[in-house]
Amino acid sequence: MEPIRVLIDERLDGAGSVLPLSGHIDEPDYELGGREFKLPEGIDYDLVLTNAGEGILASGMVRAHVLGTCDRCLEDAEFDVASEVDEYFLFEAPAEEELSDDEDEVDFSLVDEDHTIDVSEPIMAAILMETPFVVLCREDCKGLCPTCGANLNEGDCGCAAKREAEKLAESPFAALADLNLEDEDEK
């Protein structure tokens, strides 16, 4: 993703100053976990930059329509992503002794020396965080037949019934299926 640089100037010069920031990114796709996702409509973002005294807080929402591949049937799948952005850009890196044990892992960025911040990384991170781990074309997707590979959403291929019949035939109780349990007297 191309950087989206924002100049930290007189609009954000004092603590409490805010700057609304919205726009559209024509990003065609992204990759997550070795899988590729398409963004046919790009990414829309509505952020507010706030001078929080020690840095700039970028918060807001990102939205995108995503196309991927269903994990069960391998057909096209699509979903919408709406995610929150919450990134802190410090003016100066905190001294090591200022960090407590839980703050060692706190994630933050720094305002660049040219007094700019790049909001593209938190925008993309928000999209990645809301991309589902399991992508489905629909909630009740039946997937592919493990025997013949047919798409079970399009109809029953008959393999499941055949497997069930084979299991039944191999059962040690299969001979009981032919057993006549009616009393001779009742005839």
Image (cartoon, rainbow, N blue to C red):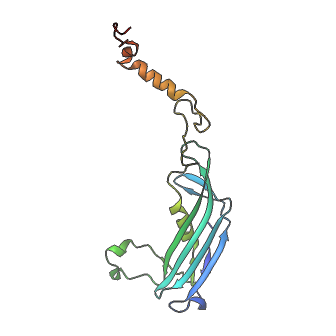
Give how far across and how far down residue 83 sits, in percent. 54, 67
Q: Residue at x 55, y 64 (%)?
A: 127
Q: Quarter of the image containing the C terminus?
A: top left
Q: Nearer the viewer, residue 96 or 167?
A: 167
Q: Nearer the viewer, residue 88 or 181?
A: 181
In the image, farthest residue toward the left: 101
Above or below 162: residue 17: below
Lateral position of residue 133 relative to residue 100, left or right? right
Q: Residue at x 60, y 90 (%)?
A: 11
Q: Residue at x 57, y 71 (%)?
A: 61
Give how far across and how far down residue 131 sits, in percent. 53, 58
Lateral position of residue 183 relative to residue 32, left or right? left
Above or below 88: residue 31: above
Q: Quadrant of residue 140?
A: top right
Give how far across and how far down residue 123 sits, in percent. 56, 69
- Residue 2 in view of the camera: no
Q: Nearer the viewer, residue 47 or 7?
A: 47
Q: Quadrant of residue 118?
A: bottom right
In the image, farthest residue toward the front: 186
- Residue 166 in view of the camera: yes
Give how far across and how far down residue 100 sits, in percent. 32, 78
Q: Quadrant of residue 29?
A: bottom right
Q: Quarter of the image containing the N terminus?
A: bottom right
Q: Residue at x 48, y 84 (%)?
A: 55
- Please count the marks in the image: 0
Above or below 37: residue 144: above
Above or below 140: residue 50: below
